[in-house]
Every structure is written in C-alpha cells, then in structure tokens.
Amino acid sequence: MKKLYWTLGSFIGLVALLAVGLRLNPSEVPSPLIGKRAPAFDLPLLTAPGQRFSEKTMLGKVWVLNVWASWCPPCLAEHPVVSQFARSGLVPIVGLNYKDTREDALPWLNRNGNPFQVVVFDADGRIGIDYGVYGVPETYVIDRGGVIRYKHIGPLTADVVQTKIEPLVKELSRGG
Amino acid sequence: MAARLLLALLLVCAAARADDADLDRRVMNLSHELRCLVCQNQTLADSTAPLAADLRGEIREQLAAGKSEHEVVEFLVARYGDFVLYNPPFKASTALLWAGPFLFVAFGAFLLVRFVRRRRTAPPELSPDERSRAAKLLE
C-alpha cells in the first residue's frame, strides 16, 4: 500500500512538473534590465529626420516604450490594442521603430494610425540591442526616475494591458 | 622607388588581412559560446537571424576596439541576461540547473541500493506449521 502511495505520489509530482514546464513560454527570456535605468538614446524622429529625441525628455513622467517595425506581422496584430491603450490617455507611448525604413514605416503608420506621442527611428537596431530587444514587438514601462519596471515580449493583448500595464502605470503615477 | 612603395603597400595590406582573419576567428570563437535569442537552440555563430548578424557585428566592433572577450560577454549579459550564455554561471538561480542531474543520479543510486539490499535479505524462516504444510504439499 505504502509503495502504491509512493509511486502514485511521484507520478503526480512528475505530471505537475511537466504541466508547469509545458505552460512556460521558452521564448520569454526574463530581462535583466528590469529595475535598471532605461538605456540612453538620442535618435532622429521617424517623422522628422532633422529632429532628435532622447529618453531624458521623459524623465519625471511614467511612460511606455513600444518597439515595433512595419515588417513585423505581430506588430500589426497588436496595433489595435496599442491604439486603444493610447486613446485612454493614461500614459504617453513612445514608439521605437526598429530596423525599418522610412519608406515602409511612414505609410504603415498612415494606414494603421499613429498611436505614439513620438516615434524614434532606430534604423540599425543599435538602441534595440541596448534594450535587449530580440523579438519585436516589445513593450517597456518606465517610471518617473527613468527605471524600467516592466517588459512585455511579443504582441500586447487587451488582457496584458488591463491586468499588468494599467495597474502598474497607475501605481507608478500615484507614488513619488 | 615605385617597386618599394608597392611592396610596402602590399605588406601593409597583408598585415591588415592577417589582423582581419584573427579578428574573424575571435568573433567566431565567441559567437559559438553565445545563444541566438531568436532561434534559441542555435549559437550566434550558426544562426542566420538578422539579430544574430547584428550581434556578431557588435561583437566584432567591440573586439576590434580593443575590448576583451570577457567585456563583450558582460555587455551582452547586461542586455539579454545569462540566457545568452550556452555555459551559464553557477549561482542561486541556476543552482538547480547545474545540480539537478547529480541530484537525480544520487536519488537513482539510493533507490538502486535499497532495492538490491532488500533482495539480498534471506527469505523468511518457515514456522513449524508452514513446514508441515509444505511437506504435505510435496508428498
């Protein structure tokens, strides 16, 4: 009888372990950047090559950085969610146009709407590397002190926005 | 004079080529130890993903600028985490990863020893009652 319990117990344990393992998403790599300062950048605007924009401009505000590209289908998929989130006016969203060309990116924004307060243009993906970007789209929540507090890899969903990003942004905006 | 100049130029070029080959080798050696984050079971050296090409370019530039292999690895770990390393360091969060196989072997050895010991114990003695029953059956 005891043996049966042992066997059954270890079997259930193994099943539980595998069940958890199967639910984890191996393509989501925890970012070492959470809790660290958002890497500095000073990039030209997508819409106005002559003007530049730096993350320092956003100091003192809670903001969201959304990395996207016109060549990335999941970015198109998340676009309605990003647009809806932007319309709520809760937080400014800065777009980082990653490894794209103006010829492709500008018509893409015209077609699908531009939810971003400002879009910076990272043509060679250098700033993307600094932010540890490896699969666009990626979304960062950055606090008033310029520290990355949250990172979402892959397309944003309404669920992620409602359960993760909005509460965090509200909390960060209230505090300090 | 012209011949000498040409020779000098050739030598410079050859030296640059040798430097290049050396740098290539260092980039390749390092990228064999690093994981491509896009296609996670490939190294940066093997992967054809655009990000892998960018990262090889970044590694190459940093090595050419005189940074050591260690510094380049630190640069990448700071951005992508230990996951970029095919040979992750031993620390609290990776302890189970490193120790796990040994724990499994130890557990297996424990079960094996227990099993063998149990089998080795002599069969139980028969009581006089059982003896007579056995004798009857054997008649």
Image (cartoon, coloured by chain):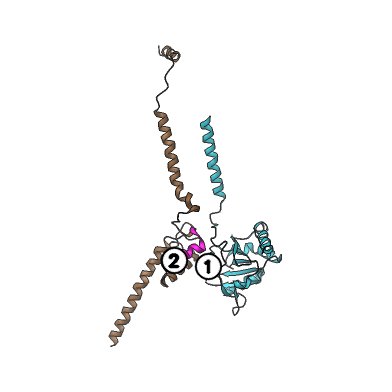
Chain colours: A cyan, B brown
Crowd tier of the residue under label 2, counting other residues whose Cα lies within 10 Å: few below 14, some 14–19, many 20 or above: few
Q: Which residue is mark 2?
A: B71
Where disc 2 sits, the SS reads helix
Residue nearer the viewer, A125 or B115: B115
Judge whether residue B39 can be spotted in this image. no
* Residue at figure coordinates x 51%, y 32% from the top left: A3
Read off the chain for label 1. Answer: A
**Residue A86 horizontal/vertical position (percent):** 68, 66
Residue nearer the viewer, B98 or B57: B98
Assess whether mark 2 and mark 1 are in contact (beta carbons under 8 angstroms): no
* Residue at figure coordinates x 41%, y 63% from the top left: B30
Vertical arrangement, residue B15 with respect to residue A77, above or below: below
Crowd tier of the residue under label 1, counting other residues whose Cα lies within 10 Å: few below 14, some 14–19, many 20 or above: some
Q: Residue furthest front?
A: A176
For the record, the magenta segment spans B72-82
Judge whether residue B109 can be spotted in this image. yes
Q: From the image, which quarter does the C terminus of chain A lie in?
A: bottom right
* Residue at figure coordinates x 50%, y 65% from the top left: B51
Q: Measure the alpha-carbon separation of dots 1 and 2.
A: 15 Å
Q: Which residue is mark 1?
A: A130
